[in-house]
Image (cartoon, rainbow, N blue to C red):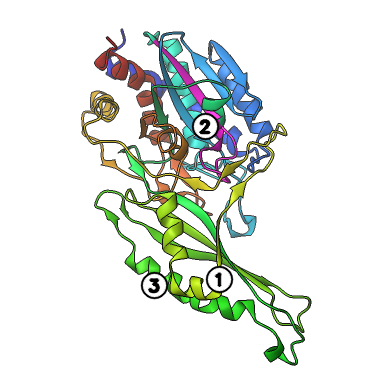
């Protein structure tokens, strides 16, 4: 069996190949629900890397299988679109490489991780690191618009339920064990329209909303949580209204809330705290948790609530210990154990389905969605080595009885 030093050396020999694969992925636009081309590029790489099976499911997720053991593990990564090209100083779809850094949309979040998990699987095949496990390397779709929807489908419809999932979002090569959840909520008020020249004849829905806006700001300051993941937050992301014309009193108003959930929050508690605001009661405001129902690139619609639960893996969990051990074996130092500020597919895997997750990925999350998005090539290489080494460390350290 190859030593950790030999696994790292093999990953380093693949540096140019994994870098080229990442640059190919960056060159392909892959907006949520339009990932077809990038999924087929991943399929080609998995097949040429000797994967035992490569499947594109009915939603459009790609699942590359390695091995056929009874222990089912999975690595997960997804893709993202460019945003405003005018903000970039380099071509976001070129994958420019300079001084050991690759630039472009998705370099960090998270086509870099996609390239690394695919090549981690390749090393497992090349170095014969298989054991009594089945590893699924997953390129998941629609994550940017609806965290975890892809994994709801994989678990419920593909009938694949791993005992552990590694979320490969950027961690700067730290080992992460959770993050806050989130919800998308609307508060709606109704008014009575009339001509704008005589507003006293109507009821302005925007005026009914105004004190609610202030109360939401105050609510954010009162939210609590626990020390590791931190407090919940709430902010208004959008406000809009309707009226028969711009010469009329508004007959409806809506605010869209981004609610980040602490470990102590639930869907019910987050809704109730808004419903109980005096301004909401006075306005007879409606509080609604939104739905997501958008077709995937394969045309499949899989509706869900825009409720993405918090998850937090216990500090002494065997998966976390194995992640740390794999890192120490390879790099002779202890990794940072932390948590994400943002949300990931873990909201479904562990938050909804109770399947343990850890996070490990190349790239610094400060560059996620930025017009300066970048990733260090050496982080890619180190991540490849960890992905190749981790499954065997985990399964051999945690034998089933």
352 vs 23, nearest the viewer? 352
- 283, above or below 68, in the image: below
- Near mark 3 (Cα within 10 A), the count class, few <14, some 14-19 or many ≥20, is few
**Quadrant (top left/top right/bottom left/bottom right) for the N terminus:** top left
Residue 284: image tag: 1
Residue position for label 3: 218
Mark 3, mark 2: which one is toward the viewer?
Answer: 3
Left or right: residue 307 compared with residue 11: right
The residue lying at 26 percent from left, 48 percent from top is 228
The residue lying at 51 percent from left, 38 percent from top is 148
Q: Gap between marks 3 and 2, in whole Å?
A: 35 Å
Residue range in magenta is: 133-152
Mark 1, mark 2: which one is toward the viewer?
Answer: 1
112 vs 227, nearest the viewer? 227
Residue position for label 2: 151
Q: Is residue 21 visible?
A: no
Does the stretch in magenta take in 135?
yes
Left or right: residue 75 compared with residue 318: right
Q: Secondary structure at mark 3?
A: helix
């Amino acid at each position: 069996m190859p030593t950790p030093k030999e696994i790292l050396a093999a990953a380093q020999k693949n540096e140019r190949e994994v870098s080229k694969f990442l640059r190919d992925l960056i060159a392909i636009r892959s907006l949520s629900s339009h990932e077809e081309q990038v999924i087929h590029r991943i399929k080609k790489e998995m097949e040429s890397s000797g994967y035992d099976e490569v499947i594109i499911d009915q939603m459009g997720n790609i699942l590359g299988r390695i091995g056929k053991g009874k222990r089912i593990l999975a690595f997960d990564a997804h893709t993202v679109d460019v945003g405003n090209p005018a903000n970039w100083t380099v071509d976001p779809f070129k994958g420019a490489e300079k001084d050991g850094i690759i630039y472009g949309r998705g370099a960090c979040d998270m086509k870099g991780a996609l390239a690394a998990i695919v090549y981690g699987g390749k090393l497992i095949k090349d170095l014969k690191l298989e054991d009594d496990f089945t590893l699924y390397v997953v390129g998941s779709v629609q994550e940017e618009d609806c965290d975890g929807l892809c994994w709801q489908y994989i678990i419920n419809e593909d009938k694949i339920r791993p005992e552990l999932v590694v979320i490969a979002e950027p961690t700067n090569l730290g080992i992460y064990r959770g993050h806050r959840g989130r919800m998308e909520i609307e508060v709606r008020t109704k008014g009575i329209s009339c001509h704008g020249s005589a507003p006293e004849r109507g009821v302005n829905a925007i005026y009914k909303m105004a004190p609610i806006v202030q109360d939401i700001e105050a609510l954010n300051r009162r939210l609590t949580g626990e020390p590791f993941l931190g407090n919940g937050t709430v902010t208004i992301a959008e406000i809009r209204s309707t009226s028969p014309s711009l010469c009329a009193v508004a007959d409806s108003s809506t605010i869209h809330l981004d609610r980040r959930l602490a470990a102590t929050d639930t869907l019910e508690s987050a809704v109730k705290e808004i419903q109980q605001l005096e301004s909401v009661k006075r306005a007879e405001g409606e509080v609604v948790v939104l739905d997501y129902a958008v077709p995937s690139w394969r045309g499949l619609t899989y509706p869900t609530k825009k409720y993405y639960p918090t998850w937090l893996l216990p500090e002494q969990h065997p998966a976390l210990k194995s992640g740390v051990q794999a890192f120490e074996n390879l790099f002779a130092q202890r990794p940072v154990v932390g948590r994400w500020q943002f949300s990931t597919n873990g909201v479904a895997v562990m938050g909804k389905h109770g399947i343990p997750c850890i996070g490990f990925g190349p790239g610094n999350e400060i560059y996620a969605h930025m017009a300066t998005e970048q990733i260090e090539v050496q982080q890619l290489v180190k991540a490849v080595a960890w992905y190749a080494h981790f499954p065997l460390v985990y399964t051999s350290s945690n034998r089933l009885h």
